[in-house]
Image: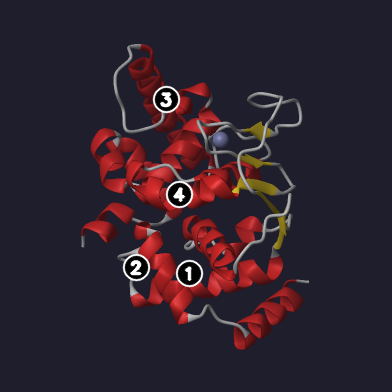
């Protein structure tokens, strides 16, 4: 059915686009979208259009989502897969948005591999094969919190990428056994180093929450990779290089240019 999906996507792109005013506002609000080349920007906008057409947004508890909200969620969700492809988000359609933080009784990861979140006031949840759940309040803070490197959308969609291999374990899909072995070696060493720092009470720009589990380290470091790449490159150069190769993007160079 690949041809049918491709045809549908071409049709969506022929009929829809992200309005310039919405794009400009998103760029102002989400500073990490800066530095993209004209080609990258066009592909990101097209990808977001397809994302908006294929995903189903549900606002709950009386919340109303604006076009700007939906566009900003789509752009942030699509940035990590800009070079990997929108197909990385196939297999599920729901994005549920709560007005504010929602309470989750369970912690960490249950037997089904569901990852649950509660980070300060920000909140989100990613279900394997199911929806992404976001708090609008946390989304709203993402723009201003961007300076500190926290971003609930990047975080939850990093979990989605991680879970493509079945488990949320900090190992995303990689092209070969050699690549997986190298990933595990570098990633585990950086995770251990970070956990040791947290244990010693050493300050890091990465949220100490990332020490909870490899999956959280992957998601929090992915947020940083796109939002504060220079800090990640400085403090975790090997991890930065690993992510650069995996995501096929170099946000530190892009944002410094
Ligand atoms: Zn998480």
Chain-order first, disc 4 or disc 1: 1
Chain-order first, disc 3 or disc 1: 1
Q: Is residue 25 visible?
A: yes
In-image side of 100 versus 57 (left or right): left
Q: Residue at x 58, y 31 (%)?
A: 118
| Front-most of residues 68 and 202 | 68
| Front-most of residues 95 and 216 | 95
> Contact, CB < 8 Å: mark 2 with mark 3?
no
Q: Residue at x 36, y 65 (%)?
A: 28
Chain-order first, disc 2 or disc 3: 2
Q: Position of residue 18 (x, y in %)?
A: 53, 78
- Reading the image, the residue beneath label 4 is 142
**Residue 166 higher or lower than 31, as above or below:** above
- Whole-Å distance between the Cαs marked 2 and 1? 9 Å
Give the mark toward the camera: 4 or 1. Answer: 4
**Residue 9 higher or lower than 15, as above or below:** above
> Contact, CB < 8 Å: mark 4 with mark 1?
no
In-image side of 237 versus 23 (left or right): left
- Reading the image, the residue beneath label 3 is 208
Chain-order first, disc 4 or disc 2: 2
What label does residue 44 carry, if any? 1
Q: Position of residue 128 (x, y in %)?
A: 71, 42
| Front-most of residues 23 and 47 | 23
**Quick one: label 4, few (<14), some, or many (20+) residues within 10 Å?**
many
* Quadrant of picture, ligand 1: top right
**Quick one: label 1, few (<14), some, or many (20+) residues within 10 Å?**
many
Chain-order first, disc 4 or disc 3: 4
- Reading the image, the residue beneath label 2 is 36
Chain-order first, disc 2 or disc 1: 2
> SS of the residue at dot 3?
helix
């Amino acid at each position: 059915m690949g041809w049918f999906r491709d045809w549908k996507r071409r049709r969506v792109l022929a009929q829809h686009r992200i309005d310039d005013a919405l794009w400009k506002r998103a760029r102002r609000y989400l500073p990490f979208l800066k530095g993209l080349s004209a080609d990258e920007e066009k592909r990101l906008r097209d990808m977001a259009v397809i994302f908006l057409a294929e995903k189903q947004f549900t606002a709950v508890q009386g919340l109303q989502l604006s076009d700007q909200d939906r566009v900003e969620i789509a752009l942030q969700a699509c940035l990590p897969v800009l070079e990997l492809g929108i197909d990385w988000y196939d297999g599920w359609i729901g994005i549920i948005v709560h007005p504010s933080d929602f309470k989750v009784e369970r912690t960490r990861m249950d037997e089904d591999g569901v990852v649950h979140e509660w980070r300060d006031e920000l909140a989100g949840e990613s279900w394997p094969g199911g929806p992404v759940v976001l708090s609008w309040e946390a989304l709203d803070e993402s723009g201003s919190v961007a300076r500190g490197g926290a971003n609930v959308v990047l975080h939850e969609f990093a979990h989605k990428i991680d879970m493509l291999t079945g488990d949320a374990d900090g190992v995303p899909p990689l092209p070969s056994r050699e690549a997986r072995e190298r990933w595990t070696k570098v990633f585990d060493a950086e995770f251990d180093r970070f956990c040791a720092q947290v244990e010693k009470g050493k300050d890091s720009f990465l949220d100490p929450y990332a020490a909870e589990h490899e999956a959280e380290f992957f998601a929090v470091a992915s947020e940083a990779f796109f939002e504060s790449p220079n800090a990640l490159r400085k403090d975790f150069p090997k991890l930065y290089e690993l992510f650069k190769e995996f995501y096929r993007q170099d946000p530190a160079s892009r944002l410094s240019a």
